[in-house]
Amino acid sequence: MSYSTEAAAFPLLRDKHFRGQWNVGYSHDLNDDKLRINLQSLCEDNVLEIKYFRGQPSYWMTPFGGDLWSRERCPIWDRYCVERYKHPNPHRQLMSVQAVSPQIRDDFLERWPIFPARRRTATIRDLGLIKWRPLGQVFVGRSDLRAGAGLEFRYLGWLESRSRIESQSGRRDAHLVAIGFRATTICAEKS
């Protein structure tokens, strides 16, 4: 399943997952059949397109759909960033951030982690940070937190939270939605 802000597999578009997947305060009340009809209509209108990953369909925003979404949600594109976390082992945690401005990247790196970590930054050519909105360049930061800086406690806490959420929900991937290790967009309030 996809945990992107611009694409999702069908299960994440269902009413029960919609709010968490898209970080919104509302959902819908469509059953699966009605949801499929609506998705098909959005594909026919070039708002969404279907792509297949390992034989499973995902619904992706098209440039036209992205433009419609942007006009409705009014994002502040200068503040957009995507974060990713990896835990190669209990003694190491990697975090990367990709942003559309160096200030947002640097602000993100200043606030995480709270313990000292090795940090690196770079500016790269945009390779599809936002698939339907090409950018000239992307500002990348990476933080490498190793054992001895409180990481063991943080990692064990993360594992404990993950196990609890998975056992309560019966889903092995529930931690990704519940903990929120996914892309976020900061949007402007309409006046």
Image (spheres, grey):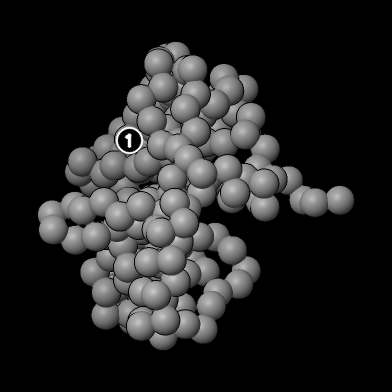
- 67 or 119, nearer to the observer: 67
- Give the total number of marks visible in the rendering: 1
Q: Amino acid at mark 1?
A: Leu
Q: Nearer the viewer, residue 107 or 78?
A: 78
Can residue 97 be seen in this snapshot? no
Label 1 neighbourhood size at 10 Å, few (<14), some (14-19), many (20+)?
A: some
Q: Residue 62: x percent and y percent?
A: 43, 45
Q: Tell me what residue is drawn at x 39 percent, y 75 percent.
A: 37
Instruction: Determine which residue is flagged by label 1.
Output: 94
The residue nearer to you, when weighing 11 against 31, is 31
Residue at the right extreme of this rendering: 191
Q: Quadrant of residue 180?
A: bottom left
51 w.r.t. 82: above or below: below
Q: Quadrant of residue 59?
A: bottom left
Q: Which residue is drawn at the image coordinates 40% and 58% (left, top)? A: 43
Quadrant for the N terminus in the image:
bottom left
Position of residue 82 relative to residue 65, above or below, is: above
